[in-house]
Image: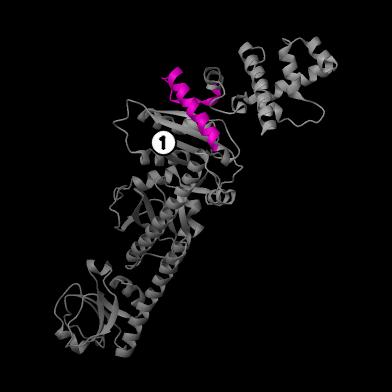
């Protein structure tokens, strides 16, 4: 590891009587400590332990670092025009060399801890903890949305961080405005440079920008526990480099894992054999489960934007970013996205999150129904494509189309060639079929009611129940259905759905 004269100064400060450090002292220039030998040329990447008697042999050079021992306290001779640390008069050569080597070893051990973390599965919080050993101040890493990604020392959390989305901490709006309105603050600072800023929320801050995957992150260190020392700038820079490496490694692993996830769904959609254990392992990488809730999207460019939006990988990445938990990929010239639904992303959230992007870039999207088995993605991809195709033909002015809005139309137009019968069933009927009651068949009740033109007396007779019992069942059914039984088209869809269920049962019994 190379350290700077400033870091060396920090470690030897208790033994230093006077010093001279200029701008180059903050650079990573020292890779070792050597005794000064008059007959050996000096290298600019070493610090030299030198006695006062040899000072006259040194040629001025601002990239040379000297550790001077043996200079009497009352000696006021001019010293070379270079960077130097003058130790107290009572320190001899052996002590000076031991002090300098100990300081170098201290930083080398610290660097080895960072490198060791990077050789395994690096954790951003752990890297911040390692840096805290030297900085002893709060360390915070923010993502492009000012959300806290990693940190050490929770003492600052209440000062200018606020909770968002459960346990997530983000820079508060007031704190962000107070910081960026400072005249010395530039939101787009040069990457790799460490800057010093008076923090309007109290104290001072060292900060630097880290760019990963074309996104800009910000590392901030506040002087809450102790004032900044000259070497802290380089430690901040080394930490930023380590965090950048860890983020790139994580991105690389994520890319491999994302490719595995895409390959899984491509195989499923192509109806190729998929090993269930391999499916489970791939989904577990993303904390998904096979029986979680999913939706499939099919996205298509319009003729208007074909020449303007050609980067398919960018479109996939953008949709994944907007939805959070999604896997987007190209297959047979179409963009397909399997969305993992959870507490923070429901079906109703998808159009809202995509709306601006779709309208700005003129895309059309077809959306399937919700499904509860990742290995059934093939049928639901087909639903999404049917929704897109039908929506494009029937409502070309709309950007977002759901299969449920076009399933009946597609069934009448194409029959059962494209999907199994159950996929065209009205969702209300499927939900009714799932009602568990060993004593009552709610589907039979509703079917008999509709087939007899809602005649209560005839329905009760055919079901061999009292009219009061029929009233109870119908009220229960109406509570479960999101449908208006007074609407003739709705009743027709429900009746056809019962026929489709009969076909599904017949097909199943023959397999």
Please tell me whether mark 1 sits on a helix, a strand or a loop: loop
Q: Position of residue 169 (x, y in %)?
A: 49, 49
Q: Residue at x 56, y 30 (%)?
A: 369
* In-image side of 250 versus 406 (left or right): left
Q: Is residue 398 left or right of residue 59?
A: right
Against 349, residue 289 (above or below) is: below
Q: Nearer the viewer, residue 134 or 145?
A: 145
Residue 508 position by quadrant: top right
**Where in the figure is residue 13, as x and y percent of width and height?**
34, 76
The residue shown at (32%, 35%) is: 310
Q: Position of residue 448 (x, y in %)?
A: 75, 16
Mark 1 surroundings within 10 Å by alpha-carbon count, few (fewer than 14), some (14 through 19), many (20 or more): few
Q: Is residue 399 magenta?
A: yes
Counting every numbered tag in the picture gives 1
Residue 231 part of the magenta-drawn span: no
Nearer-the-camera pick, 142 or 304: 304
What segment is highlighted magenta in the picture?
Answer: 377-405
**Magenta-highlighted stretch: main secondary structure?**
helix
The outermost residue toward the front is: 510
- Image position of 425 (left or right of 393): right
Instruction: Report which residue position mark 1 lands on.
Output: 332
Quadrant where the N terminus is found in the figure: bottom left
Residue 402 % position (x, y)? 51, 26
Pick the residue in front: 174 or 243. 243
Q: Is residue 461 visible?
A: yes
- Is residue 39 placed above or below 304 in the rendered structure? below
Residue 457 left/right relative to 129 = right
Q: Is residue 342 visible?
A: no
């Amino acid at each position: 590891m190379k350290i700077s004269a400033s870091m060396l100064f920090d470690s030897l400060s208790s033994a230093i009587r006077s010093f001279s450090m200029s701008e180059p002292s903050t650079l990573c220039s020292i890779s070792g400590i050597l005794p000064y030998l008059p007959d050996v040329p000096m290298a600019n990447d070493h610090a030299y332990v030198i006695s006062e008697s040899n000072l006259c042999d040194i040629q001025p050079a601002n990239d040379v670092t000297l550790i001077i021992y043996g200079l009497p306290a009352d000696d006021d001779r001019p010293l070379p025009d270079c960077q130097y640390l003058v130790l107290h008069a009572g320190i001899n050569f052996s002590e000076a060399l031991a002090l300098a080597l100990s300081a170098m070893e201290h930083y080398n051990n610290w660097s080895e801890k960072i490198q060791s973390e990077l050789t395994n599965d690096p954790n951003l919080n752990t890297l911040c903890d390692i840096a805290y050993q030297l900085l002893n101040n709060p360390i915070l890493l923010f993502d492009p949305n000012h959300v806290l990604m990693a940190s050490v020392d929770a003492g600052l959390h209440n000062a200018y961080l606020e909770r968002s989305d459960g346990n997530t901490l983000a820079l508060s709006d007031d704190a962000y405005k107070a910081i960026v309105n400072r005249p010395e603050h530039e939101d787009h600072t040069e990457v790799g440079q460490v800057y010093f800023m008076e923090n309007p929320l109290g104290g001072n801050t060292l900060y630097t920008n880290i760019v990963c995957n074309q996104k800009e992150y910000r590392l901030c260190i506040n002087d809450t526990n102790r004032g900044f020392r000259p070497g802290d700038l380089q430690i901040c820079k080394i930490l930023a480099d380590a965090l950048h490496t860890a983020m790139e490694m994580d991105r690389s692993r994520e890319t491999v894992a994302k490719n595995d996830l895409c390959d899984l769904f491509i195989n499923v959609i192509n109806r190729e054999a998929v090993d269930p254990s391999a499916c489970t392992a791939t989904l577990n990488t993303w904390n998904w489960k096979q029986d979680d809730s999913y939706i499939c999207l099919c996205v298509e460019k319009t003729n208007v934007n074909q020449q303007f939006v050609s980067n398919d990988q960018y479109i996939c990445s953008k949709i994944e970013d907007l939805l959070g938990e999604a896997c987007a990929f190209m297959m047979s010239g179409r963009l397909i996205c399997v969305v993992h639904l959870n507490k923070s992303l429901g079906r109703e959230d998808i159009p809202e999150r995509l709306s601006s992007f779709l309208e700005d870039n003129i895309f059309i999207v077809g959306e399937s129904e919700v499904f509860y088995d990742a290995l059934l993605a093939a049928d639901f991809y087909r639903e999404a494509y049917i929704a897109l195709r039908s929506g494009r033909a029937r409502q070309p002015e709309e950007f977002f189309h759901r299969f449920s809005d076009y399933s009946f139309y597609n069934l009448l137009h194409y029959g059962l060639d494209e999907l199994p019968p159950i996929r065209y069933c009205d969702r209300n009927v499927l939900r009714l079929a799932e009602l568990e009651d060993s004593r009552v068949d709610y589907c039979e009740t509703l079917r008999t009611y509709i087939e007899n033109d809602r005649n209560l007396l005839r329905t009760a007779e055919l079901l061999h129940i009292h009219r009061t019992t029929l009233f109870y069942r119908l009220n229960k059914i109406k509570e479960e259905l999101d449908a208006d039984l007074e609407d003739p088209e709705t009743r027709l869809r429900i009746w056809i759905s019962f026929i489709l269920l009969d076909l599904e049962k017949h097909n199943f019994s023959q397999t």
